[in-house]
Structure formats: C-alpha cells, structure tokens
Image (cartoon, grey):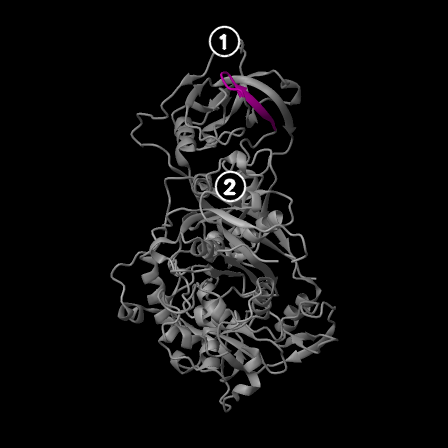
C-alpha cells in the first residue's frame, strides 16, 4: 500500500471468529465461513446491505480441494451483485487478504469491505497437499515439521539459545489460549514439565511445540472515516500495512531471518512512524506454528538484535503480563485453521487496540502488530493498528 | 526433454450442513427436495443461502421426479466418471414444482431425440448411497404433460430410513497432467544417471544452482554454464525425524532417520537428503558426507560420512 497523500484512513469496526475446533462436522464450509461473517457484521452492527465488496482468502487449493471459493461462497456471504475476489499467498493468506481489503478502502474504491479467511482442516490434508508426487523428484522426506526443524536448529546454533526456549513459548501460548474462548486447544492441565516431556517429532521440535489442526474462520469489516463514525464500538485504525515475498530457495536465502520479513516490517514501521518497535508497540500477534519461531520472528521484526530474541522469551517479556506480550490469543500454537491463521493474527491485533480482547486483553494497548508468513518462509504480510486514527 | 504423466488425486471429505444433508438423504429415499427462497421461488438443487438476499434458507419442499428439459448439449464421447458410458445429452431439467433447473444426463439414442421442452423423468440408480449419482440419469417420459399444476409440497427434510441422514460425502478429486521438468532439470536428471551432479552458474552473481532451474531466481537471468558439483558435501543443518510421513514415497524408511541440508562442494545452496551409515544421534552440523547410490534409483539413496574432519562453521554458515 502506498502512503501517498490523500489516502483514506482505514478502520476495523467488526471482528468475528468461529470457536475453533478439530472438526466442525455440523456445518458445510459455507456455513462455517458465514458464522464468522455474521459475527463481524454483528460487531459492526451492519447487515449485508452495508457491505460494498467481499475479499476472501483460503489455504492452497490442494489442501482442501475448494478451487473457487469466490464462486461457491457468494450466496453465503451476501456478495451477489457486488465485487468479490480471492487472494492467494499460502499460509500468510489471511494477512494478505486483509491488506487487499484495506487497500480497497484506502484507495476509496469501496467504503466498507468484508474480508474473510477460513479452513476446514478436518476436510483437508495439508501433508498430502505439500507432498504431491512430482515425477523425477525424490519425495519430500519429512512433511512441514521436517521442513522447518532444520531452520530451528540453525537458529539455535547461530544464537546460542538454551534448549528450553521452545518449551517456554509453547507453555505461554497454551496458557494464553485458556483465556481465549475461540481458541482450539484449551489444555487446562498444561505444565512446563508436560511440554518438555512430550515426544520429539522432528528433533529439535517436540509434539507440544507444534500447532494443532483446526477448523475455523475469521472475518473483519473494514471501513472508511464515515463508516468508523457510525460504528457502535471503538475501531482499530490501520497505521501501516505491507507484504513482501521471495523465492522458496535461492543462494543466500536466510531461512532463520528472511530478508522479505525484515523489509516488510521496515515498511510497516516507516508508514506508521515507528522508530523503536520494542518501545512503541504494546502487543504483537505473530505467526508461530512451531514454538521456536517466536524468538526467530522477534529478531526478524526488529524487536531484538540478531541472536537475542530468545532473551525476551526467557525473561518473560513476551508473557501476557510482560513488557511486550506476544500471541495473547494463544497463537497458531493453539489454533491453526491454516487458511484463516494469518487473519486471526491481524484480528487479534485489532481486538487489542479496540480494548475488546476480553480475558487476554493487554491493559492499555494502543498499538499492536499483526504478522503472518507462509510458504517456505517466503510470503510475509503485516499490519500495525492503533487505537487512534493515523496522523498526517 | 523429459516428460511423464502426473496424476493428482485425493478423496476430499465434505460435511454437508442441514440443506445438502436433506437433499442427498432424499435422493437415497427416491425423493427430490428443493428449498423455498424468501420471495417464494423453489430452487432445485437446494442451496443454504438465498442468492438474492443472502438469507438463511431452511424451508424444504418436495418436487416431482418428472420435469422439462430447458436446454441441452449432446455429449458424443463420454469421459471417465461421467453418468453414462455411451453418448448422451447433458440436460438442464426443471422438475415439476421447481423454478430452477438441475444439471444431469439424459439417456436418449441420439441428438434428434432431445429438444428444449422434452418431458423427462428420473431413472433411479439401483443402489443409492446419498449422492447425486443416486439419480442414474433422466429418461424420456411420454406419460406426463408438465401442465398438471403440480406444486412443491412442504417437507420436513426428515426420513424414516434406518440408515439415518446422510451428513457427509467423499468428493474424489483427480487432475491429470503431463509433467515436464524443462531443459535445465532434464539435463540434471540425465547426469544423475551417471552418478554425476551438475548444476548451473548464474552469469551475474556467479552462484551455482543445484538443481539448476534454467534461471537465477535473484538476478532473473537465464543460466546455461554447467558446473559439476560434489560428490562430497557438508551437513549444514538437519533434524531427526521420529514420525513416519504419510506419503507413500518414503514409507519404507524406518524412523528415526536424519533429514539434512547438504551443501555439495562448489554448490551455493543446500540439497535436502537423508543421512545414514552413522548413528542418528551422532550426526552434527559440519559433518562431511558423500552420496551412496543404489543400483536402480535416480537419486542417491542417502549420504554417509566420509571420515574427513568436520567443516568449520564459517565455511558453511551461509548455506544453512
């Protein structure tokens, strides 16, 4: 998004999510997505008639075999007679979908846009979708966890982080999830010892340090200044948003701290006038599908110097009552409908600055960052939202 | 250039929700259900949400098993998975009592035997499971006129059958492709047959890509200069896999095994491969390895230690 003069301020005035669970066999995909949409409309006190356009995102087509959600879901989302479009960026899609929707408002193409993302992992197969039998190639040997685990080991080697850091992240996020009624995993008897005793799946990644497989959907209503003035509850204002991408693999790719992630964060901070993210941002909801990605992204996003992100985790800074709370909702580690996971991060950032996050509210949060990534650490989408409208 | 068939298929499951559940349960019980919209129209097949108003629709109605062809197209060569194996007409049929038409197959001897306005009736499948294929096809119907004033009748959507309602289906998806890896990868794969690993160097950044892609992804220029790399290399990072992947390609590999990134000597990015010939818990970053070929395979079966001293971290830290 450009920050050219004259762009319209964008406000988040409605947020809806399903209660995320392992399997929603009682509803169709349309029924699931509609639940989130109705939640967002109710929050904004709008009807379908108040929506000018619909922007939807979902997991890669092979994951769940739905190739044209914009066609299949137009009835369910009140999109008949309106523009409806779909965004693709692998696991970051929920974030990039929200940013495309925001750009339509910022560019004054539409006044009010409904944006949604979903996945029914119970009716999908991500492992299969990631391991199609391409002729002449050796099969991918180890699945998604096996893809990311060597990068975690590389981070541990590079930073010298103690082995327990990953378990601290999982223990924190699972406890945060207990305060979030929408979270999938509610492990009431979670202890640090249980996390550390869980089996190694892809050493150095333990079972309890991996994300679950969830069914869920998330929706937001984005609107302009006039829409925000009519909103019944405080809006979250968009202060900066950006996307960056890079190839899956190339000579010089840094999987531990990808260039695209650094550049994306720098663009967001520049738009938002953030000079020192560690001091100026009150809460961060980032895409952490395996626990060690918390310290890795803390460095990539500029909250800590290279090699020092784990110190924020270890010292409790990222706890819900810490100085820089991270993944207040329980994060991807507690809820992972892949296609929706990026948007859930963005929505949590907005809930925080609206003061609507309930038991996982960070008191007085004024600026929050939502972050999503996808593919082989190659797609990044982020937004920074604030309690006050952007200045200038 | 190499080419090979690539078939992608998967049995996706689908939960139906209340309206499609009633519709498919109805077909199993030889009953066609539609749904009434907010403005009173009857949609067959039914939908969950009103196309005009987005209202939730739950007002089910039963329509007749007879109807009228509203338009059609002749299918002279049926393909795998289509309703009939002999030539047939694709038809849109407005069932008596419905306001919209259903797509299905009409069993007629030739295109001269169908026209817009042809009266038809459902031929039910002998074995019905709660799927659109419970309607085997349509056939011509000389006995009904279509102007008998038959109306849709309200229906609860519930059936007395012992099997209970149909709540889900399996949607078998299949895509048939012809795959070609392209010029650069074809050369790479052919060289592997001689147990040689050949990459390509970018003319701008001088990085050597293995496998080669025919272009440098960072410089965006074509690559043609071939460079043989390896056969030895360095383990730059790895994980120990303790659970079996579900894809059949490597189901034969026992766990635990080591999945490693290996920077072959002279290559500028790492390959992914399995390490063996050493206890899994003794594999380490910097371990020097070499490929182990099996007789019939295109790729090395795995890599094993060479016995050389470990590589210094600074020599491979950019290749993780």
Q: Residue at x 50, y 32 (%)?
A: B54
Image quarter where the C terminus of chain B lies is bottom right
- Looking at the image, which is closer to me, A16 or B150? A16
Q: Is residue A319 magenta?
A: no
| Callout 2 touching callout 1 (CB < 8 Å) | no
Q: Is residue B119 depicted above or below B13 in this figure?
A: above
Residue A143 makes an appearance in the image: no
Q: Residue furthest bottom?
A: B309
**Label annotation for residue B88:** none
In percent of width and height, residue A164 lies at 35, 76
Is residue A200 toward the left or the right of residue A51 in the image?
left
**Circle 1: element type:** loop
Q: Is residue A52 depicted above or below A369 in this figure?
A: above
Is residue B284 toward the left or the right of residue A272 in the image?
left
Label 1 CA crowd tier, 10 Å (few <14, some 14–19, many 20+):
few
Q: Residue at x 46, y 24 (%)?
A: B34
Which residue matches tag 1? B149
Which region shows up in magenta? B88-99
Q: Chain of mark 2?
A: A
- Looking at the image, which is closer to me, B31 or A296? A296
In percent of width and height, residue A232 lies at 45, 42
Q: Residue at x 39, y 54 (%)?
A: A357
Q: Is residue A199 depicted above or below A92 in this figure?
A: below
In percent of width and height, residue B22 lies at 39, 29
Which residue matches tag 2? A230
**Circle 2: element type:** helix
């Amino acid at each position: 998004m450009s920050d050219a003069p004259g762009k319209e301020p964008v406000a988040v005035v409605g947020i809806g999510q399903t209660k995320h669970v392992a399997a929603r066999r009682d509803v169709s995909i349309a029924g699931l997505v509609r639940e989130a949409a109705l939640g967002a409309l109710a929050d904004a006190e709008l009807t379908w008639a108040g929506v000018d356009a619909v922007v939807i995102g979902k997991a890669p087509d092979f994951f769940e075999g739905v190739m044209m959600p914009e066609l299949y879901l137009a009835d369910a989302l009140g999109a008949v007679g309106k523009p409806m479009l779909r965004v693709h960026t692998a696991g970051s899609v929920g974030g990039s979908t929200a940013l495309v929707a925001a750009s339509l408002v910022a560019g004054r193409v539409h006044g009010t846009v409904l944006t949604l993302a979903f996945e029914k992992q119970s009716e999908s197969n991500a492992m299969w979708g990631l391991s199609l039998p391409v002729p002449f190639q050796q099969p991918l040997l180890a699945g998604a966890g096996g893809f990311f685990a060597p990068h975690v080991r590389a981070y541990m080697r590079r930073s010298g982080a103690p082995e327990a850091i990953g378990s601290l992240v999982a223990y924190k996020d699972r406890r945060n999830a207990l305060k979030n009624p929408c979270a999938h995993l509610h492990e009431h008897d979670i202890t640090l010892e249980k996390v550390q005793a869980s089996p190694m799946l892809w050493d150095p990644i333990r079972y309890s340090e991996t994300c679950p497989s969830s069914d869920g959907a998330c929706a937001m209503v984005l609107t302009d200044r006039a829409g925000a003035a009519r909103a019944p509850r405080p809006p979250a204002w968009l202060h900066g948003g950006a996307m960056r991408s890079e190839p899956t693999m190339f000579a010089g790719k840094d999987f531990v701290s990808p260039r695209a992630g650094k550049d994306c964060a720098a663009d967001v901070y520049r738009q938002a006038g953030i000079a020192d993210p560690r001091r100026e941002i009150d809460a961060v909801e980032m895409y952490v599908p395996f626990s060690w990605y918390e310290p890795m992204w803390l460095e990539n996003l500029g909250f800590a110097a290279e090699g020092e992100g784990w110190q924020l985790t270890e010292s409790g800074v990222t706890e819900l009552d810490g100085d820089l709370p991270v993944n207040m909702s329980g994060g991807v580690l507690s809820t992972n409908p892949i296609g929706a996971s990026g948007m859930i991060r963005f929505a949590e950032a907005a809930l925080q600055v609206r003061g609507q996050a309930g038991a996982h509210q960070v008191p007085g949060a004024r600026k929050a960052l939502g972050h999503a990534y996808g593919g082989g650490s190659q797609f990044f989408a982020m937004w920074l939202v604030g309690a006050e409208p952007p200045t200038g | 250039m190499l080419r090979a068939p690539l078939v992608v298929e998967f049995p996706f499951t689908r939960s139906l929700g209340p309206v499609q559940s009633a519709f498919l349960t109805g077909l199993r019980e030889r009953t066609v259900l539609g749904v009434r919209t907010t403005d009173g129209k009857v949609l067959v097949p039914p939908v969950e949400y009103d196309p005009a108003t987005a209202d939730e629709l739950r007002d089910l109605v039963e329509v007749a098993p007879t109807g009228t062809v509203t338009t059609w197209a002749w299918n002279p060569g049926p393909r795998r998975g289509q309703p009939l194996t002999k030539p047939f007409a694709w038809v849109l049929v407005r069932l008596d009592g419905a306001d919209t038409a259903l797509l299905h197959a009409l069993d007629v001897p030739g295109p001269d035997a169908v026209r817009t306005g042809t009266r038809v009736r459902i031929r039910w499948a002998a074995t019905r499971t709660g799927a659109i294929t419970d309607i085997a096809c349509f056939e011509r119907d000389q006995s009904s006129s279509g102007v008998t004033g038959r109306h849709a009748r309200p229906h609860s959507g519930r059936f007395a059958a012992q099997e209970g309602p149909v709540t889900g289906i399996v949607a078998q998806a299949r895509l048939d492709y012809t795959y070609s890896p392209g010029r650069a990868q074809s050369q790479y794969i052919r060289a592997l047959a001689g147990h040689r690993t050949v990459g390509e160097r970018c003319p701008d950044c001088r990085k050597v890509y293995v496998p080669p892609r025919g272009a440098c992804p960072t410089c965006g220029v074509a690559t043609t200069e071939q460079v043989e790399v390896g056969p030895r290399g360095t383990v730059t990072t790895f994980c120990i896999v303790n659970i079996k992947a579900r894809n059949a390609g490597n189901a034969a590999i026992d766990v635990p095994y080591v999945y490693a990134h290996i920077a072959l000597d002279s290559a500028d990015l790492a390959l992914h491969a399995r390490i063996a010939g050493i206890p899994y818990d003794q594999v380490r970053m910097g371990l020097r390895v070499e490929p182990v070929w099996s007789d019939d395979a295109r790729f090395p079966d795995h890599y094993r230690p060479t016995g050389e001293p470990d590589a210094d971290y600074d020599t491979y830290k950019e290749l993780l």
